Image (tube, rainbow, N blue to C red):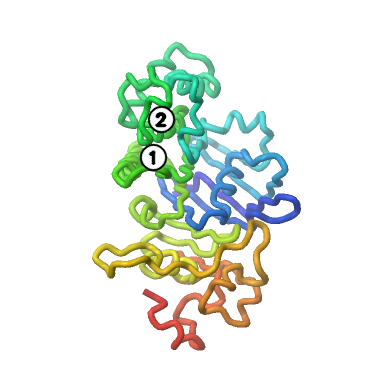
Amino acid sequence: MRNVLEIRDLRVSHRGKDIVSGIDLNLARGESLGLAGESGCGKTTTALAVMKLLPEGFRQEGSIALAPEGSDEPIRIDRRTEAGMRVVRWRHVSMVFQGAMNSLDPVKKIGFQLEEVINLHEGRSSGARQRVEELLDLVGLTAAVARRYPHQLSGGQKQRVMIALALACGPSVVIADEPTTALDVVMQAQVLQLLERLREELGLALVLISHDLGVMAETCDRIAIMYAGRIVETGPMDLVISDPQHPYTKHLLESLPVIGGERGLAPPIPGGPPAPGDPPEGCAFRPRCPYSDEICFQPPDLAEAGPDRLAACHFSPWSKWPVLSDASKGANP
């Protein structure tokens, strides 16, 4: 299966400090990839780098290649100017931004905003209004929504409008940044089911950004765990969930509540993540890791930790933890 998106050694710096460092990711056609981690780990920065929408003052390096359906040569996003990216955004790769109410224009009707995206990226057409109705129907909204303002919609309806905007020009890749933020659990489930259905029906490749591994387990084929601007573990979703190969992944999973388990708060990860661009010496997770040792003062490489698995830990796979066998009892679920 040909990759529709390939990221190689992506680095994003601000004021001389690396906010994102050495990111390598592949995304196949029709595949769903989860990008998970705590707030401030670089997930959204990575997404904005793919879209080339980083704020002023940020420097971006590395290779980002996009191969949409029907293209003979990949589109090198990293080499595109702003004018060149206007041809790429929304037509080939689009983004569902976090916080639908902040992304929609409060003084313009929904139909106008959808038509504006189509006209800007595909040229003005008499069929734009019909396309708007089709897009709204695609995301489970009635044509009447086109005549409403954002404040007249519920949170779930606004999020569906954001998804419709992302699909307006038929992109090959959609990046969804925390698409269920501020939604109740029922609406969260509906939005996730909608994304999954659209991915299957339209053959989209989806990047889902979240800190909630439970959300990703229901939606994604593969997952990449980020910490302090780096990927610390990646692999198929079911394998990462059932057999984490990095202590940070393990602690993220333990922080999730278990249905039918003991009542009480889930154990938190001790300490807090480092400030963006200012990781500690060696392994960035070392100050918070209960299994750290002297070797952890040296930065680990993202290396093979099993079939189709990569982990940035000196001791992965977990079967190679002889000196910690007593302390790590129960560490590998």
| Image x and y of residue 37, in percent | 50, 57
Residue 173 is at least partly visible in this image: no
| Quarter assignment of residue 193 | top left
How many numbered discs sit on the rendered protein?
2
Could you say which disc has been placed on residue 161 in the image? 2
Label 1 vs label 2, nearer the camera: 2
User: Residue at image x 45%, y 57%?
Assistant: 223
| Image x and y of residue 272, in percent | 55, 64
**Which residue carries the number 1 mark?**
203
Up-down relation of residue 151 to residue 311 (above or below): above
Q: How many C-alpha atoms fall within 10 Å of the one at disc 2: few (<14), some, or many (≥20)?
A: many
Viewer-proximal residue among 275 and 177: 275
User: Residue at image x 52%, y 19%?
Assistant: 119
Q: Is residue 207 left or right of 218 when viewed as pictured?
A: right
Could you say which disc has been placed on residue 80 in the image? none
Viewer-proximal residue among 207 and 145: 145
- Looking at the rendered structure, the kind of residue marked 2 is Val
| Image x and y of residue 205, in percent | 44, 43
CA separation in Å, label 1 and label 2: 20 Å
Up-down relation of residue 180 to residue 224 (above or below): above
Up-down relation of residue 220 to residue 317 (above or below): above
